[in-house]
Amino acid sequence: MPGATKEAMKAAVRIETVRSSGSGVVVSPDGFVLTAAHVVGGAKTVDVVLADGSSISGTVLRRNPSADLALIHLGEEGFPCLSLAGARADLGTELYLIGSPGGEILTHTLTRARRSPSDPKIQPIASPRRRPAET
């Protein structure tokens, strides 16, 4: 596992609400966490389980259901964090996916993948069809 991945694992968190759980990532040392809007649902507060297993309460500041994103604030500082990339990864780039797909049972998993054109979020750019020149 690359060293950067070990550091990234420290910024990964598990989000728990009364109705659901999911993954998130600390994106600033002052306690801002990015997660999916479907994970927080309509909750105003959530429990955030850090990589070391400790839990802290977080306040849901914003949610954007159409982008499926939510922003949580932990109210404390000094957290390990990841910075957000400024650009989309190129096709073929090796990626490391960190998450908690199984709540308490399957938490802080690491999956290695490559970004491929078969990714459903990638829309191929269609070029207009040209008609043959008429003579």
Image (cartoon, rainbow, N blue to C red):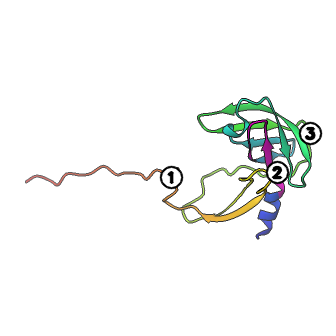
Q: Secondary structure at mark 3?
A: loop
Q: How many numbered markers are drawn?
A: 3
Q: Which residues are magenta?
A: 10-22
Q: Earlier in the sequence, mark 1 or mark 3?
A: 3
CA separation, marks 1 and 3?
A: 37 Å
Q: Secondary structure at mark 1?
A: loop
Near mark 1 (Cα within 10 A), the count class, few <14, some 14-19 or many ≥20, is: few
- Where does residue 46 sit, x and y in percent of width and height? 82, 36
- Where does residue 122 sit, x and y in percent of width and height? 50, 52
Q: Earlier in the sequence, mark 3 or mark 2?
A: 3
Q: Earlier in the sequence, mark 1 or mark 2?
A: 2
- Mark 3 touches mark 2? (CB < 8 Å): no
CA separation, marks 3 and 2?
A: 13 Å
- What amino acid is found at the position of numbered circle 2 in the picture? Cys
- Where does residue 108 sit, x and y in percent of width and height? 78, 57
Q: Is residue 89 above or below residue 79?
A: below
Near mark 3 (Cα within 10 A), the count class, few <14, some 14-19 or many ≥20, is: few
Near mark 2 (Cα within 10 A), the count class, few <14, some 14-19 or many ≥20, is: many
Q: Is residue 46 above or below residue 11?
A: above
Image quadrant assignment for residue 63:
top right
Residue 104 forms part of the magenta stretch: no
Residue 90's label in the rendered image is none
Q: Secondary structure at mark 2?
A: loop
- What amino acid is found at the position of numbered circle 1 in the picture? Pro
- What amino acid is found at the position of numbered circle 3 in the picture? Glu
Q: Disc 3 designates what residue?
A: 76
- Where does residue 109 sit, x and y in percent of width and height? 75, 60
The C terminus - image quarter: bottom left
Q: Disc 1 designates what residue?
A: 120
Q: Disc 2 designates what residue?
A: 81
